[in-house]
Amino acid sequence: MSAVIHLQALGLTEYEARAYTALLALGRAVPARVARQAGIPRPKIYETLERLEGRGLAAKVGQNPLEYAPLSAREYLSRSRRSFDDRLAALDRDLSRLTPDPAPEAVYHLHGEAAIRSLAEDMVLNARRCVFMAGDQTLTDRLERLTPRGVELCRAELAGLPLIAARGQRAFLLARDNEAAMVGHFIPEGESGEAHGVHTHNPVIVHLIEGHIRLAELQKQKG
């Protein structure tokens, strides 16, 4: 069950996550019934429900017989979100003390298709104003779906333009908010070699990639 997996990612144990989702399905129930619903050994259910109570996810609603009911999942999610945001803010402060922001002219190398795709997704999800993308259709299809609402999207194909990757490789270009860019070269399946690329905040390269994509879009419109 995906809810159990997501709850574990938020810090619950497997038994806690299973017991909580069982309570949500049952509404209120005696521990033995929760154990059956959740697939938890009966000797473990009492301590599991007590831990859920301590987390603010369950409450006793009767003593004879002893019953438990789930507390609001929405409240738990709100608490978890605030806690996560606080941790991210603290991490950001700590990391900023350790390392300065990268120089705008720096160019970072990417190795492997997974690294390229992961960074591309992060760039698009963080976009605030505009996204430019061109090249590999499978990746651009996915990134278009991930583009936040309200962000201007310029998407094009690279056909008819000078090659920017070695012959036989698939090129991919991405720029975000006029401040970050990436170039990726994908290796066709069955060919030797590793996908590679670069990532930069260098404004000259960012504007160059944006211009290349706009030119590709104009070429398509003329065609």
Image (tube, grey):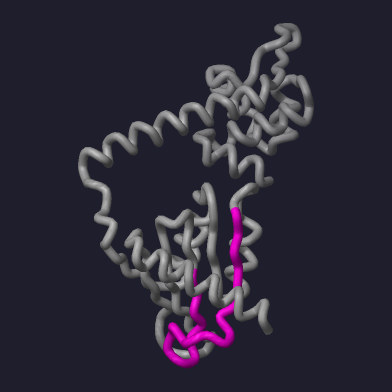
**Quarter of the image where one finds residue 203:** bottom left
Residue plotted at (37% across, 65% down): 199
Q: Is residue 179 left or right of residue 48?
A: left
**Quarter of the image where one finds residue 62:** top right
Residue plotted at (44% across, 74% down): 184
Question: Who is closer to the viewer here, 78 or 147?
Answer: 147
Residue placed farthest to the bottom in the image? Answer: 167
Residue plotted at (58% across, 37% down): 7
- Residue 161 painted magenta: yes
Where residue 74 appears, x then y in whole percent?
66, 26
Where residue 32 appears, x then y in whole percent?
72, 25
Question: Who is closer to the viewer here, 100 or 79?
Answer: 100
Residues in magenta?
Answer: 152-173
Question: Who is closer to the viewer here, 173 or 219?
Answer: 219
Q: Is residue 65 left or right of residue 215?
A: right
Where residue 13 appears, x then y in whole percent?
53, 35
